[in-house]
Amino acid sequence: MKLNKATVEKIAELARLRLKEEEKELFTHQLDSILTYFEKLKELDTKDVPPTTHAIENVNVFREDEIKESLPTEDVFLNAPNKDKDKKFFLVPQVIEQD
């Protein structure tokens, strides 16, 4: 497939792009090279190649949930800069402005 400047201009219009004249020339050459490469790929026999969604096989990396003992509350708050006197909450600066 030979791509021409008019096709690049139409693609740019559809994509709402304003291209300079030198960009149109550059993109015409680049897109034509890409499409020529894809034409070459059509020559490959892929009838025995199963379709894939990824280049490498994905494996589930999640671990099983295991119930473990939590840290004691006193230990959790040891390094907290701000805490309430009952050691039940972390105190943080207000992030929502009220009018």
Image (spheres, helix red, strand yellow):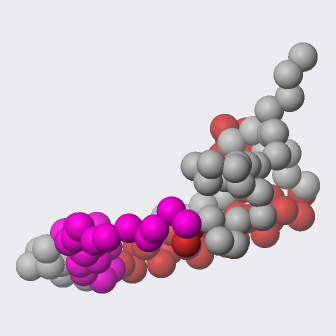
Q: Nearer the viewer, residue 40 or 72?
A: 72
Q: Nearer the viewer, residue 35 or 86?
A: 86
Task: Say if 2 sits above or below 89 in the image.
Answer: below
Visible residue check, residue 43? no
Which portion, as a residue range, is magenta? 51-74
Dominant SS type (magenta): loop
- The residue located at (38%, 67%) in the rendering is 70
Query: Horizontal placement of 30 versus 33: left or right?
Result: right
- The residue located at (85%, 22%) in the rendering is 98
- The residue located at (45%, 68%) in the rendering is 72
Query: Horizontal placement of 34 versus 29: left or right?
Result: left
- The residue located at (62%, 65%) in the rendering is 77
Residue 92 x/y as whole percent: 76, 49
Query: Horizontal placement of 96 versus 74: left or right?
Result: right
Residue 82 x/y as whole percent: 77, 57
Residue 4 x/y as whole percent: 66, 58
Q: Nearer the viewer, residue 34 or 73?
A: 73
Residue 84 x/y as whole percent: 70, 49
Task: Say if 92 sits above or below 74 in the image.
Answer: above
Residue extending furthest toward the top = 99
Task: Say if 66 sits above or below 40 in the image.
Answer: above
Q: Locate the C terminus by quadrant.
A: top right
Q: Is residue 76 magenta?
A: no
